[in-house]
Amino acid sequence: MSRSLSNAMSDHTMRLWDANTNRCVRSFRGHTDTVNDVAFGDGFVASGSADHSVSIFDPSTGQLMRTLYGHGGAVRSIDVRDMYIASCDAQGGVLLHDVRAPTEPVREYSLLDMANYMPNKIVIHPKGSLIVGGGEEKGYSELGGFVWTEGSDGVLSLEGEVHDLALDPDMRRMAVSEGKAGQIGVYSII
């Protein structure tokens, strides 16, 4: 499968598509609730679900290889770098798992313990640090945005809730979708 796409589904599955033919090659089953995010790794494809878990599948066979637990809420975003899977959940939990190790996370954080942060998106920087973006409750149904970088002294506060973020090819800046403000901001991460 030289050119493949994968998507998350509300029917509790993830699907792998051939980008050349636009046909579904395989469906992956292993969750008991909506699949919210998917990511490819070296020899595996992973999915994060509202059932509070991350599942790892063999893309060639569709076989469920392992399920990772530890989240207290719906998994909203996952990212893969090398043999690591980072995930964040609707309760502020952030986990980093090594896919070769037992199911216990390598690192674990609660963004709700730091402040009232609700993560929407997670990425792994190539140097290994985790970057999380989301919303911060500032009062009755009022959200501001935040970007938290593991190992940093503070949190970048933004006017609008962060819906997505991406690193540039140099890994020196990130683009952040600030939902309420309707803007995309570019920020230095070094």
Image (spheres, grey):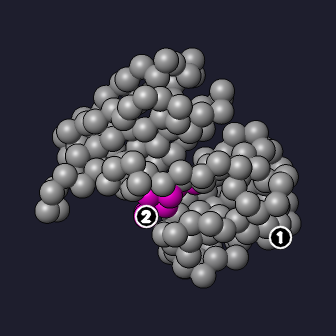
Q: Position of residue 143 (x, y in %)?
A: 21, 52
Which residue is disc 2 drawn over? 91
- The image shows residue 14 at horizontal and vertical percentages of 63, 67
Residue 182 at least partly seen: no
On residue 184, which mark appears? none
Three-letter code for the amino acid on which mark 2 is drawn: Gln
Instruction: Please give the range of residues in magenta.
Output: 87-93
The residue carrying mark 1 is: 63
Residue shown at 56% from the left, 39% from the top: 130
Q: Is 40 left, or right, of 10 in this rendering? A: right
How dense is the environment of label 2, judged by Cα within 10 Å: few (below 14), some, or many (20 and up)? some
User: In this orientation, which residue lies closer to the viewer: 51 or 22?
Assistant: 51
Q: Is residue 23 above or below residue 78?
A: below
Is 135 contained in the magenta span?
Answer: no
- Above or below — where is 13 with respect to 25? below
**Residue 157 at least partly seen:** yes
Q: Is residue 49 left or right of residue 57?
A: left
SS label for mark 1: loop
Q: Amino acid at mark 1?
A: Gln
